Every structure is written in structure tokens, then in C-alpha cells.
Image (cartoon, grey):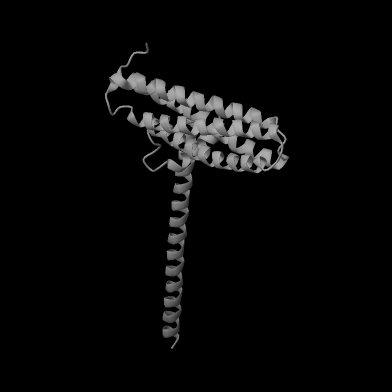
């Protein structure tokens, strides 16, 4: 009987050891996967940080590009500029809708001076939306119709994005002086500032792309 009891305890201890070993392996594997993901995420953030150093608003740049990082790395410089422009365009469209709503509210009042300021801001944003749309389409054409048209595309994008940036900056300054409610003014300013930052970063990322493109395709600066 004594021999049977010892054997039974041994089997129980062996079973517990097996369960412990399996649990240890699972925990170790989970820690390894988590550590790898954290390390990968950290490397991606560092890489995006390095790409955004040339922009005036690096934090906004990182927020824009980081979601598009894959295991293969960051998109090409041309795609980075396209992502930034597309984000700027989407933000500008939402901002345009919001400013139009504010303008419509002011149309119901007799405060003509305030309405003119907001309406002028809306016109600037509307122009900016058109210019950024043109810039995005132009950027997509670079490299598709030969290097001889590179300078033409480059000049168009730079001109249109710069014009959009100037327009939204004027809009931002105009809103500062009108008499809409402080809370509404703060919301308008925040939205316009985001468009301004994205437009500025888009221009910087585009310049970075064109510099590399020129070098790799032996295109001389006139």
C-alpha cells in the first residue's frame, strides 16, 4: 500500500510540474511577444521622429505619419507627402464646413462686421481646399509622365500649398479680431491652426521628397 501512495503522489507532483512548465512557457511567450511589439513600436516612433525633424510642427507630423508605419517601415518620401496633403485636405474640408456653420449663424444677426470677417475666412479656406486638392493631384503625377515635367509639377505643388498656407494664416488672424463667442472662436482657431500646421508640414515633406528625387534622377536645380 505504501508503494502505491508514493507512486500516486509522484504522478500528482509530475502533473503539477507539467502545468507549471506550460504556464511558464505561455507567460514567457506572452512577455516575448509584448516586448517585441513594444520594441517595434519604439523603433517605429524613433524612425518617424527622424523623418519629421525637417518640419515646423514635428508633433503633428508624427501624429500624421505614425499610423501608416508597417513592418516594412515608413512609406516612401513621396507617399509621406501625399499622406500629409491628404490629411490636410480632409481637415480643411471639415474646417470649411464648421466655419460655414458659424457664418450662417452670424447671418441671422445684425453684426455685419463680424459676419464679414468670418465670411472672408470661409473664402480663404474654400480657396485652400481647392489649392490642396490640386496639389495632391499634381503630386501623384510626379514620376508618371517623365522627368522632363518634374519641375513643372514641383513648381505647381509648391505654389498651391504655399498659397493655401498663406490663406489659412490670414483666416486665423482675421478670426482673432471678430466678436464671436470665446468658446466658438477657440474652436474655429483650433481647427484653422491644425490646417495651417498640416499645410506647413506638407510643404516641408514635399521639399524633402523633391530634394531626394532630384538627387536620384540627376535633375539639376535651375
Work out whether residue 136 can be spotted. Answer: yes
In the displayed structure, 169 sits above or below 187; it is above
On the picture, is 34 further left or further right than 118? Answer: left
Report the residue that reaches farthest toward the left: 146
Q: Position of residue 156 (x, y in %)?
A: 41, 23
Q: Residue at x 43, y 26 (%)?
A: 206
On the picture, is 40 further left or further right than 146? Answer: right
Q: Position of residue 135 (x, y in %)?
A: 42, 29
Q: Nearer the viewer, residue 107 or 203?
A: 107
Quadrant the C terminus occupies: top left
Work out whether residue 53 can be spotted. Answer: no
Q: Which quadrant would residue 12 be assigned to in this image?
A: bottom left
Q: Nearer the viewer, residue 112 or 82?
A: 112
Q: Nearer the viewer, residue 103 or 30?
A: 103
Quadrant the N terminus occupies: bottom left
Q: Residue at x 51, y 36 (%)?
A: 62
Q: Position of residue 3 (x, y in %)?
A: 42, 84
Q: Residue at x 47, y 30 (%)?
A: 202
Q: Position of residue 150 (x, y in %)?
A: 33, 21
Q: Residue at x 61, y 34 (%)?
A: 119
Q: Which quadrant would residue 81 be assigned to in this image?
A: top left
In the displayed structure, 211 sits above or below 123; it is above
Amino acid at each position: 500500500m505504501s508503494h502505491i501512495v508514493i507512486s500516486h503522489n509522484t504522478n500528482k507532483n509530475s502533473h503539477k510540474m507539467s502545468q507549471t512548465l506550460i504556464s511558464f512557457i505561455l507567460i514567457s511567450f506572452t512577455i516575448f511577444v509584448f516586448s517585441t511589439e513594444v520594441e517595434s513600436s519604439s523603433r517605429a516612433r524613433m524612425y518617424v521622429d527622424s523623418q519629421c525633424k525637417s518640419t515646423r510642427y514635428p508633433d503633428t507630423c508624427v501624429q500624421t505619419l505614425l499610423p501608416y508605419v508597417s513592418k516594412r517601415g515608413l512609406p516612401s518620401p513621396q507617399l509621406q507627402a501625399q499622406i500629409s496633403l491628404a490629411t490636410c485636405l480632409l481637415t480643411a474640408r471639415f474646417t470649411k464646413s464648421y466655419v460655414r456653420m458659424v457664418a450662417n449663424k452670424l447671418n441671422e444677426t445684425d453684426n455685419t462686421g463680424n459676419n464679414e470677417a468670418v465670411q472672408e475666412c470661409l473664402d480663404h479656406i474654400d480657396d485652400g481646399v481647392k489649392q490642396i486638392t490640386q496639389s495632391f493631384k499634381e503630386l501623384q503625377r510626379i514620376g508618371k509622365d517623365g522627368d522632363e515635367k518634374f519641375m513643372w509639377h514641383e513648381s505647381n505643388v509648391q505654389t498651391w500649398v504655399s498659397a493655401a498656407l498663406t490663406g489659412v494664416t490670414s483666416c486665423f488672424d482675421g478670426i482673432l479680431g471678430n466678436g464671436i463667442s470665446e468658446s466658438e472662436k477657440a474652436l474655429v482657431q483650433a481647427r484653422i491652426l491644425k490646417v495651417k500646421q498640416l499645410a506647413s508640414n506638407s510643404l516641408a515633406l514635399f521639399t524633402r521628397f523633391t530634394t531626394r528625387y532630384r538627387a536620384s534622377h540627376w535633375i539639376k536645380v535651375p
